[in-house]
Amino acid sequence: MKTNRREFLKLGAALSLAPMLPSNIFANNIDTKLIKDGEVFTAAHWGMLKATIKDGKIISSKPYQELSKISNPLQNTMADLVYKTRITAPMVRKSYLENPDSPKPELRGVDEWVEVKYEDAIKLVARELKKTREQKGMQSVFAGSYGWYSSGKLHNPRILLHRFMNLSGGFTGSLGDYSTGASQVIMPYVVGSIEVYEQQTSWPVVLEHSKVVVLWGMNPISTLRIAWSATDDQGLKYFEQLKDSSKEIIIIDPLWSETGKFFGDKARWIAPRPNTDVAMMLGMAYYLYTSGKYDKDFIANYTTGFDKFLPYLLGKSDKIPKTIKWASKICGVKESVIKNLADTIYANRTMLMSGWGMQRAHHGEQPHWMLVTLASMLGQIGLPGGGFGLSYHYSNGGAPTCVGGVLGGINAASVGVIKDGKYQGLASQASDDEAAQSWLNAGTDYAFPVARIADALLNPGKILEHNGTKITYPDIDFIYWAGGNPITQHQDTNTNLKAWRRPRTIVVNEIYWTPTAKMADIVFPVTTQYERNDLTMTGDYSNQNICPMKQVVERQHFAKNDYEIFSDLCKAYADGLVEAFTEGGKTEMDWLEEFYNVAANAVNANTALGITMPKFNEWWNKNEPTTFAPTLESESWVRMADFREDPILNALGTPSGLIEIYSQAIENMNYDDCAAHPKWFEPAEWLGMKNKPAKFHLITAHPTDRLHSQQNNTSLRDNYAIAGREPVLINAKDAVKLGIKQGDLVRVFNRRGEVLAGAEVSNDIIPGVVRLREGAWYDGFGDGLCKNGCANVLTLDIPTSKLSNGNISHTGLVNIEKYQGNAPKLEAFNAPKGVKNI
Ligand SMILES: Nc1nc2c(c(=O)[nH]1)N[C@H]1C(S)=C(S)[C@@H](COP(=O)(O)OP(=O)(O)OC[C@H]3O[C@@H](n4cnc5c(=O)[nH]c(N)nc54)[C@H](O)[C@@H]3O)O[C@H]1N2
Ligand SMILES: Nc1nc2c(c(=O)[nH]1)N[C@H]1C(S)=C(S)[C@@H](COP(=O)(O)OP(=O)(O)OC[C@H]3O[C@@H](n4cnc5c(=O)[nH]c(N)nc54)[C@H](O)[C@@H]3O)O[C@H]1N2
Ligand SMILES: [Mo]
């Protein structure tokens, strides 16, 4: 290591030292002293937490309150998250350190690493970033940096990265997200809003009025363990109340998930083949239409284009009537079951709740479009307890919105101008500067859909059709990622790895030695959220609490906050930049006070609330959340009730103002993979295809005991690992045929790659389908066999369609066999070559 550091200093000789931000900040009257023995309140995606500290160490963590009896073990792992698998110091990949101009990118993931001084790493990144912008233009810097990082209004690595990248001259970003890539693009054409991140008809209304609740492709008992801000646990509480009610519950899912097990006998299970729901819904629609069991008035008054959809439904346009029989052949569900389902939801007040799994599939625009069409035929949209809801499984959708305050937060600023090594101000204010004006737009011009990352890296200059526009991929030569794990989370890992070996420079801010950190050239060690101070709301739709996220323990090793790393990069990049970035030197606590005041001022101005929020220091020192209450209106709120009441005055945001079963806007795009009305398209790989390239349909559902890849490195893994690996769920009959037993080590593979997994054999999944949850850290550097069962080694990296270009991670076929020979060692949680394990 010593020689390597000397080598670094040789090439870094031109770099001078700049003063760094102090690493611990004390503000007046604000208690930032750490509690060495006692309890600390904080919050995370997985909820409001109490940590027990002894001698300055985390002993345990638990939920702050227990709203429901459904346990959430993600809340108990704080100690592991702080003490395990950490990146201890700034590190640079050896070949990069030796020659950043010719850094042997093909060695990413297998090269040796060298520890460097923080100041030197900062200088190196600033210098190489500047070089890339000068040589290739700002659009060759990709800092989309999608990810789920940690909760917090200040320490938001993605926004901080964007703030730095904007102010220092611009970058290429990304569009949309992995979660709802298809639905968030199609829904605005259909109902005029994105739906997936919007408040749902309030739970108390559902509990009072719905007779039937359909859970269509959703696993809320698992996915409600977290929220984007911090969960308030109300979602789980309401599902408990639903279970205790006398309503009919119908679960439509190829597998009997945690949610199925939670409802047990209370729920009926309908299990279609994966990715065939649209066919099933079409069969239902055909039956309802031809038997006159649909709401003609609703179709006439609140929708447009049903007449243009009918020729397709009835088979007049393609000679294929979408009968129940036709549907049954495709989806594998008995005709009588489909008919009964249609009758049940027609005859009863029904809430069609849907998760997002089925839109993360080839032609993923169609399921929710068809669901809305079906709901329109039922005519219950806008009625209490009727219609559809696309967010009951996520972030406590349907928990009534509280009235109170909403915190401020750090923002991404906008593009700045740097000249002669000096920050000149925002480009938007330099209207006479032509170059500045062109920079202003370049980043947005080049931004591409988030899940096209590998495609973009591999095909600079390629033109992508997207949602009626054409996007040219930039020539990406520099990637900066902070707060995501794309090597584990992006589809078709082997193609992705090739793509990630294209750019000259990759910088990653990470807490742990994740596969993404291992694929970088330079890594900065980052604090966990438990090693810094922040603020968060809970809910996300409810906005029920404002939480202090008080620092729980000392920083570990040489970890820095993202805020400091980007502040220091500003200092190294150009004079005057850090002042813009920090707004004249604001500290952590200065920002938090400001964000708090946004909420507190609103609360204090609203005397009707009967809540006074004290001065920030007083509130902070108490280390407790402030809780707001819902109102009578929010408790009885019904989605689209206003539209139903008056579709002209309260028109939807669609071109017609109505629900669009046919979209002229989409027709005008003339895409071959997304028609102007909902339609059944065969996915690229599925069980009903001719010449199947592999035997089993792979579902890569979201993990119950993780948040994606987060927490794979905690002791929770001991509870679910089988044969020391990520489990793959397989039907008992299939297992017998393959000679596979519960607990066996198996190889799951297709033409895209291979992984090892542990066989979990049961009848909780239909024959022909297997489930390997997303988020197991990729562990195949070197020989390509992932020893940790990373699902994305097997998934397809093609877009949903030209309309939305979403990812299709629930589409794809795999083979499975018992693993022969000695089990290779698991290395997913080891530090890379040249770095000591901790
Ligand atoms: N096969 C398959 N793939 C999928 C999906 C699927 O269903 N199937 N789902 C997709 C979906 S919906 C999503 S949202 C994505 C999620 O993909 P990601 O958001 O990339 O996944 P995470 O594992 O949450 O990665 C977050 C990373 O941020 C780090 N981190 C946490 N806090 C901080 C911080 O303060 N600073 C910094 N610098 N880093 C921090 C964590 O250690 C972790 O490595 O995955 C997608 N991938
Ligand atoms: N514990 C935990 N909670 C989470 C997350 C996590 O990683 N862990 N991730 C969060 C994030 S970022 C997101 S985007 C959401 C994701 O929320 P979702 O997208 O809803 O979650 P998934 O697990 O991908 O899919 C939900 C269900 O759909 C089923 N399914 C898959 N394909 C089909 C199909 O073709 N037809 C039918 N009918 N069903 C199908 C799956 O078997 C699964 O049970 O969850 C959030 N909540
Ligand atoms: Mo997501």
Image: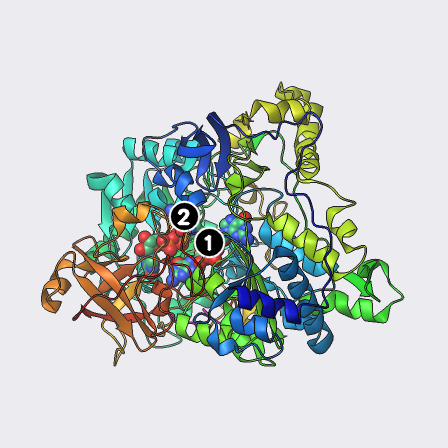
667 lies left or right of 356:
right
Disc 1 target residue = 512
Q: Main secondary structure of the magenta part?
A: loop
Is residue 341 depicted above or below 64 in this figure?
below
Q: Position of residue 586 (x, y in %)?
A: 73, 41
Q: Secondary structure at mark 1?
A: loop
Residue 372 sits in quarter: bottom left
Tell me if label 2 and label 1 are in contact, CB under 8 Å: yes
- On whether residue 179 falls in the magenta region, the answer is no
Disc 2 target residue = 84
Instruction: Give whichever of discs 2 and 1 has the lower sequence position.
Output: 2
How far apart marks 2 and 1 lie (CA) works out to 8 Å
Task: Give the class, few, some or many, for how many residues have Cα within 10 Å of label 2's Cα (few <14, many ≥20).
Answer: some
Is residue 609 depicted above or below 11 in this figure?
above
| CB at disc 1 and ligand 1 closer than 8 Å | yes
Write the residue at 41% across / 39% down.
Answer: 79
Residue 550 sits in quarter: top right
Residue type beneath disc 1 = Tyr
Q: Position of residue 46 (x, y in %)?
A: 43, 40
Write the residue at 44% across / 31% down.
Answer: 51
Q: Position of residue 790 (x, y in %)?
A: 34, 63
Task: Give the class, few, some or many, for how many residues have Cα within 10 Å of label 1's Cα (few <14, many ≥20).
Answer: many
The label on residue 469 is: none
Res 664 visible: no
600 lies left or right of 309:
right
- Give the magenta part as a residue range: 794-801
Colouring chosen for the image of the structure: rainbow
Q: Position of residue 30 (x, y in %)?
A: 66, 27
Residue type beneath disc 2 = Lys
